[in-house]
Image (cartoon, grey):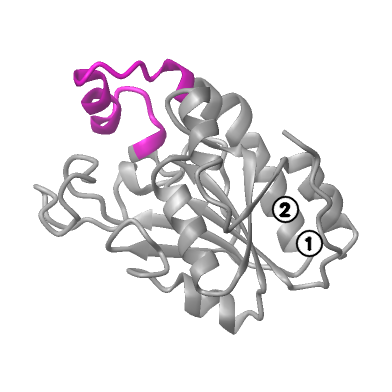
Amino acid sequence: MTALKLPIWSPGDVGLLVSDMNNAFTERGSAFDLGRQSVGTNTEYYFDRLVKVVNPAIQSLAAAVRAAGGPVLRVKPLIVDPQGRDWPRGARPGGSLVPGTHEWELMPGLVAESVDYEVPKKCVSAFWCGNADQILRNRGVRHVLVTGCLTNGGMLINAIDAAMRGYQVTVIDDACATFSQEIHDAALSSHSVYKISSSAETLAALKKSI
């Protein structure tokens, strides 16, 4: 990946969006995992990357964004119907997904602070079917860092949707994951409405805004 020169941000300019990093999508043996395996998908790469690469990168970015005066948004699908009929057809993770359940909670090691926002969404986009846009605008955010999973699913859709609403968007390469490096790279290169950066480059830029 070519090094990207990020702008010098002012305090509070930057928000972090973390897409779908709850247990329903990040736990081996979950309905999501078993469903993917049932159609022949090898999920080992995905889960290994989440634990070893993505989780630590998001934790570091969240701490830096908070220190720079920006909000951290933890985006999660809200599915009440046990058969998932209140969720778009073809994108159902399997079963209901509601607060208070194990599946709703963040994956182990990914710690939310009391100042973070939990953003339920009723479709894949937290901007279209959630209140991500309201939170970011009310906080004065102009630049959104997008992370989470899947690189070619929820993460990508939220990155594009943020850009369509006028935000400057940077996708953090090592803070998102999907089922192979090839799918990951293809998804990131499929659109030009966002920039792509590593967590290390982004952390360095955030330190300058403190």
**Three-letter amino acid code at the position of disc 1:** Ala
Say which residue appears at 27% left-offset and 32% top-offset: 32
How crowded is the residue under tag 1: few (<14 C-alpha within 10 Å), some, or many (20+)? some
The quarter of the displayed image where residue 207 is located: bottom right
Label 1, secondary structure: give it: helix
What residue is drawn where x is 19% and y is 49%? 96
**Residue 145 place in picture, x, y as percent:** 63, 56
Amino acid under disc 2: Ala
Q: Nearer the viewer, residue 9 or 103?
A: 9
Alpha carbon separation for disc pair 1 and 2: 6 Å
Residue 26 magenta: yes
The image quadrant of residue 130 is: bottom left
User: Considering depth in this image, is 85 or 164 the residue closer to the camera?
Assistant: 164
Q: Nearer the viewer, residue 70 or 102?
A: 70
Which residue is pictured at 83% across the width and 72% down the height? Answer: 10
Residue at disc 2, secondary structure: helix
Q: Which residue is mark 1?
A: 67
Numbered range of the magenta stretch: 25-47
Question: What residue did someone put label 2 on?
Answer: 63
